[in-house]
């Protein structure tokens, strides 16, 4: 296992460390939670451990189905080894059901099933509050090439199909989620995390929210929701 060296970056939910291997980073998942671009702050007990493990389940599944990801191995409860990525500063949101900012912006009732998946892009900038952008902005700001964006669209939609089907089987509806991509030796890889922090997950029968919306909206038992997702994915308690 390559050695954990100095911290390169601290984000709102994770820390990234250099390792003894120049092609690998170590990612550490924190319990810190923020919402509304950091305006709301808190802690979700054990979130780092659960998001590390849940992300590993999803990355392994996606790799097995042909989606290239940065995931290499789980190292500890809160740490995973990943391929180094030069992050593309575009956050990609895929939506199957209207919720959150889409429901608000277009006046749709939360829970309205969309007839086809909706893909959106946001400029990854805390300073600007992640504004929504389109292909023209991405080209003009030189955030990614058209060829990279074609690849990203294809990977995002395939990821949606794979996760949606997998989660349905666990009685979870994949409402929407956010992905980040990066370049590793010029190859586009899926990066960041896939967890209840970055997805909206509803129980298929009761529509109970099993994700970070419980924190954003001050609902009870946030920890329990993350644990419930982990339990359904792995069958573990
Ligand atoms: P939204 O409805 O607030 O735009 O969120 C869409 C999806 O993206 C939802 O699953 C939560 C996720 N998301 C993040 O992962 N990070 C963010 O900063 C935001 C705003 C949303």
Image (tube, helix red, strand yellow):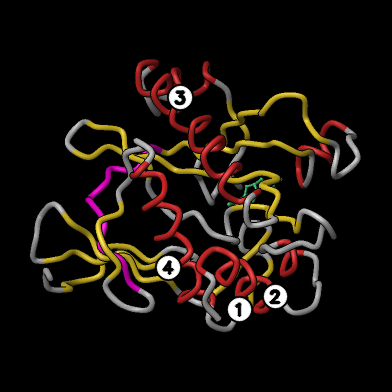
Residue appearing at x 81%, y 35% in the figure: 113
Mark 3: give few (<14), some (14-19) or many (20+) Cα within 10 Å: few
Between 96 and 140, the one lying in front of the other is 96
Give residue 6's position: percent from left, percent from top: 19, 71
- Mark toward the viewer: 1 or 4: 4
Which badge, 1 or 4, comes first in the chain's sequence? 1
Residue placed under numbered mark 3 in the picture: 154
Residue placed under numbered mark 1 in the picture: 44
Marks 1 and 3 sit apart, C-alpha to C-alpha, by 33 Å
Mark 2: give few (<14), some (14-19) or many (20+) Cα within 10 Å: many
Kindly indicate the quadrant of the structure image that contains residue 4. Answer: bottom left
Instruction: For the C terminus, give its image quadrant.
Output: bottom right
Residue appearing at x 51%, y 45% in the figure: 125
Residue appearing at x 22%, y 50% in the figure: 84
Our reading of the magenta stretch's main secondary structure is strand
Disc 2 secondary structure class? helix
- Mark toward the viewer: 1 or 3: 3
- Please tell me whether residue 95 is drawn above or below residue 220 in the rendered image: above
Between 14 and 128, the one lying in front of the other is 14
Residue placed under numbered mark 4 in the picture: 52
Mark 4: give few (<14), some (14-19) or many (20+) Cα within 10 Å: many
- Please tell me whether residue 16 is drawn above or below residue 71 in the rendered image: below
Q: Is residue 184 magenta?
A: no
Residues shaded magenta? 79-88
Ligand 1 within 8 Å of disc 4? The answer is: no
Marks 4 and 2 sit apart, C-alpha to C-alpha, by 16 Å
In the picture, the disc for residue 222 is: 2
**Circles 1 and 2 in contact, beta carbons < 8 Å:** yes
């Amino acid at each position: 296992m390559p050695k954990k060296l100095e911290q390169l970056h601290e984000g709102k939910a994770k820390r990234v460390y250099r390792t003894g291997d120049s092609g690998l980073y170590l990612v550490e998942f924190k319990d810190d939670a923020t919402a509304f671009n950091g305006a709301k702050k808190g802690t979700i007990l054990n979130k780092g451990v659960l998001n590390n493990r849940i992300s590993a389940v999803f990355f392994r599944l996606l790799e097995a189905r042909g989606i290239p990801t940065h995931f290499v191995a789980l190292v500890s409860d809160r740490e995973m080894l990943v391929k180094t990525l030069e992050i593309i500063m575009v956050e990609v949101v895929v939506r199957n059901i209207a919720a959150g900012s889409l429901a608000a912006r277009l006046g749709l009732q939360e829970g309205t099933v969309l007839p086809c998946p909706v893909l959106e892009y946001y400029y990854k900038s805390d300073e600007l509050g992640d504004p929504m952008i389109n292909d023209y902005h991405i080209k003009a700001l030189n955030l990614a090439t058209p060829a990279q964006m074609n690849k990203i669209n294809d990977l995002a939609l395939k990821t949606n199909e794979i996760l949606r089907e997998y989660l349905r089987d666990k009685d979870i509806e994949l409402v929407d989620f956010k992905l980040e991509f990066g370049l590793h030796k010029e190859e586009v890889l899926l990066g960041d995390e896939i967890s209840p922090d970055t997805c909206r997950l509803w129980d298929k029968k009761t529509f109970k929210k099993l994700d970070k919306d419980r924190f954003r909206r001050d609902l009870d038992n946030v920890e329990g929701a993350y644990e419930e997702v982990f339990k359904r994915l792995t069958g573990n308690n």
